[in-house]
Structure formats: C-alpha cells, structure tokens
Amino acid sequence: LLRVWPVNSQQPLSTPRFVCPGRVNLAQASPDGCYIAVTILEKIHVYQVASGRIVWSGVHHLQPINVVKWSVDGGLVVCGGQDGLVTVWGLSHTTTGSTSTPTPRLVLADHSLPITDLTVSSPRLVTVSSDHTCKMYDLEGGSLLVSVVVNSLPTSVALSPLETEVYVGTADGPVLVISMTSPPRQLEYHLDAENTKVLSGHSAAVRSLSASRCGSLLLSGSVDGSVKLWNVVSGHCELDLSH
C-alpha cells in the first residue's frame, strides 16, 4: 500500500491510496505529478495519481530493478536493474489505453554488472554500474556515445544542465567531475585520475547527487550522514550538513 503525506503534516491523506501487488522497493513521481512509477522486484507499474489505479505494467528485467527515473518531460521512464540491463519505457500505454502487453522502447545491455544509478536529460542518458563504467547514450536511438572506465566503484551520477560535465559519486566518498567538452575519439577510455577534478570530503559512499540549474553548484548525499553543497568551479564545499 502506498500513501501520500503532505510536506507540512505527519498525517497521510485519506486519498489517494495505491494498492500494490507486492512489496514496493522504489517509487518515483512523474515531473507533472500525474503518475507514479513503482517497482516491485523486476516489474514496473505506473499508477495514475488522480484515480489511484494501475494504468500500465511491464516486465523485462530478469532481476530486481535498482533505480527508476523519469525523463524531464515525463514522456519516458527509465529503469536500471540488478541484471545490468537498462530499459526505457514510453508513457504512451498510459495515455492511449492500449491493452497490449507493453514492451520497452529501448533495451541497453552494455553493462556487465548491476546498475547503481542513472540520470536522464532530454537527449541523453547516463548510467553507472558496479562494472566500474559510466556510459552516456543517445536516448533517441539508444546508441552508446562514450564509456568511461573509473577506478573507484561508482554509486551515483548526475549531469550538468549544459551536459558539459558528468558527476560520479563513488563508494569511497570522492565525487569525480568528468568533462565532456573534449571527449576522446575512442568509444571507451580509462579516466585519467591525475587530470580529473575530484570533490573530496565524504568518508563513505555517495548515494545521491543533484546539480543546480545554473550548473555551478552540486549537492551530494552520503551514507556517512552528511549532505554537502559544492561549488563545482572552485571545488570547494560551500555548506556541510551532518546528521
């Protein structure tokens, strides 16, 4: 059962209530707030907020889904699984009332180990995996644009608004800033640690990253109990909130 809480109250709303067919491991609201993507093991269900009913369900992963994200325009839902697959689903099934079994628009199988995080912009998709790679795709056709091999285990990822930098949080704590302004000619390359900007301050895995709209600030959250606000230009920590 999913329930909705107002941000200014400790009591849930009486409606809507979402009855789920199993234990929910992930839930993500669409940008317009009209739909909620819910994952249960390897399946994804999309609920309509106004009615509380399931309007679309799909399954393609062979193992549980680790992460689910919406595109900025709300037209796509992207899942990353324990099986290393990334599936891109269109919202058309929820809006057209199709009764056919939905299938993903894209299935990306370039990772060899579980997906740890992903981020979606309008034309780009960036994924990180336990296979120590960060990959960028073209969402239109699903083509792999570049694959970056990193030494540390990547645990989270974010993309700058202009798509000039990719921020990768690691299991050790540092956040890597990978420049996309002069990408290499080869499809896959190893990150040069000596020439890569690193935001150091966390002492444990960084699980969440969020870039500001202006592109100069980055928010990071870690299992060490701290949230840090970074100036990505200078590399300095502007604010440190510890729990």
Image: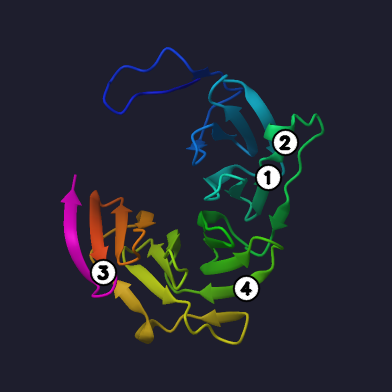
Give the magenta range: 232-243
Is 233 covered by the magenta stretch? Answer: yes
Tell how many labels.
Answer: 4
**Residue at (30, 53) in percent of width and height:** 222
Identify the residue at image location x=61%, y=32%.
46
Q: Is residue 82 left or right of residue 119?
A: right
Whole-angstrom CA distance, mark 4 to mark 3, is 28 Å
Mark 1 lies on residue: 90
Q: Which of marks 4 and 3 is nearer the N terminus?
A: 4
> Mark 1 is on which residue type?
Gly
Name the mark on residue 145. Answer: 4
> Where residue 51 appears, x then y in whole percent?
57, 19
Q: Residue 115 carries which label?
A: none
For marks 1 and 3, give the CA distance: 38 Å
Residue at coordinates 82% horizontally, 33% vertically from top-left?
100
Discs 2, 4 touching: Cβ within 8 Å? no
In depth, the one of 138 and 201 nearer the eye is 138
Which residue lies under the disc numbered 2? 93
Point out the tag, 2 or 4, that comes first from the N-terminus.
2
**Residue 220, position in %: x, y?**
31, 56
**Residue 3 rendering spot, x and y as whole percentages:** 44, 21
* Nearer to us: label 4 or label 3: 4
Q: Which of 88 and 30 is in front in this view?
A: 30
Give whichever of discs 2 and 3 has the lower sequence position.
2
Above/below status of 204 relative to 151: above
Q: Is residue 213 above or below residue 8?
A: below
